[in-house]
Image (cartoon, rainbow, N blue to C red):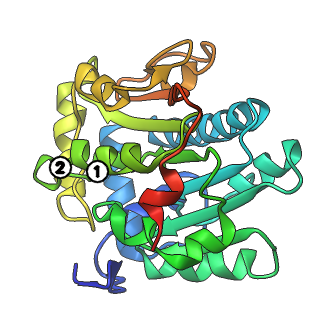
Amino acid sequence: MAHREGINVFDPETPNTARMYDYFLGGKDNYASDRQAATEVLKAFPEARQLARANRRFLARAVRYCAESGVDQFLDVGTGIPTSPNVPDVAREVHPGARVVGVDNDPVVLAHDRALVETHEGIRILPGDLRRPKAFLTDPELHEVLDASRPIAVLLVAVLHFVTDAEDPAGILAAFDEVMAPGSFLVISAATSTGTDPEALARIEQVYARASSPAVFRPAEGIRTWFDGFDLHEPGLVDVSHWPSPAGVRPSVRVLAGVARKPEAEEGLSLFAHKLSP
């Protein structure tokens, strides 16, 4: 799929990962190619709908956890097609003035999200690609919404497994780490090859190889290293349906999830504002 300024060029004939996820969640903002690809995934892994919903519930729980821990700013990367409850809904139940920036590279996602939030102060949807984080981290529009002098919760939920090794997920995370203020949260969920049915994994990889982004299943220990330099909160890196406590049976295809906080600097100073200045 072609790119323009970090945004995918709309192509209804190519299955899109965000629209497939929308289909798994029961949404209607998808096309025939997305439904066909998602149906193939369901044949290989009938629990895909339940796992997508478990991941969505994790996002809501993690946002609430961060908000109740004092954070009232959220950067949702790969925000996806709007689903209720969304990040602003949950955050503003705790902090009515919570501020949220969503980032996505799909034009369908951007159109739907912008229509939903255009009348809401303190919420902004920006074009951007996770693979090029510095482009949106230095976007002046981001700084119109988020206060760069205070902690922010960075949400990377069900997106890093669409980044290949060649695209350097560790380097992407380092770019966020470099600019996150002490006290910021890092929220991640990602598909893992550890404890996953190899046959189902191979069939899912085949489907996503034809989609807008391939699916990459990584060992649990590799995913754990993404939290290096952060304090991983209990219960640690666990199945997405088990955060913060076990709920349901572990599926044959696994997504791991964790929430971590960047330690406070000794002098209480933040480099966030300096590093992110446009």
Residue at 57% across, 34% down: 54
* 35 or 106: nearer the viewer: 106
Q: Which image quarter holds the C terminus? A: bottom left
**How many marks overall?**
2
- Numbered badge on residue 168: 2
Residue 4, how many percent across, how many down? Answer: 29, 87
Residue 204 visible in the shown view:
no
The part of the image, by quadrant, that contains residue 207 is bottom left
Residue at 48% across, 20% down: 231
Residue 229, how many percent across, how many down? Answer: 37, 26
Residue 8, how many percent across, how many down? Answer: 33, 79
**CB atoms at circles 2 and 1 under 8 Å apart?**
yes
Q: What residue type is labelled 1?
A: Ile
Residue at 32% across, 32% down: 226
Within 10 Å of disc 1 (Cα), the crowding (few <14, some 14-19, many 20+) is: some
User: Label 1 belongs to which residue?
Assistant: 172
Residue, far left:
166
Q: Which amino acid does label 2 sit on?
A: Asp
* 257 or 14: nearer the viewer: 257
Q: In this view, does 272 lie above or below 113?
A: above
Q: Is residue 52 above or below residue 36?
A: above
Residue at 22% across, 32% down: 218
Residue 149, how many percent across, how many down? Answer: 62, 53
- Numbered badge on residue 158: none
The part of the image, by quadrant, that contains residue 1 is bottom left
Q: Is residue 33 above or below residue 181?
A: below
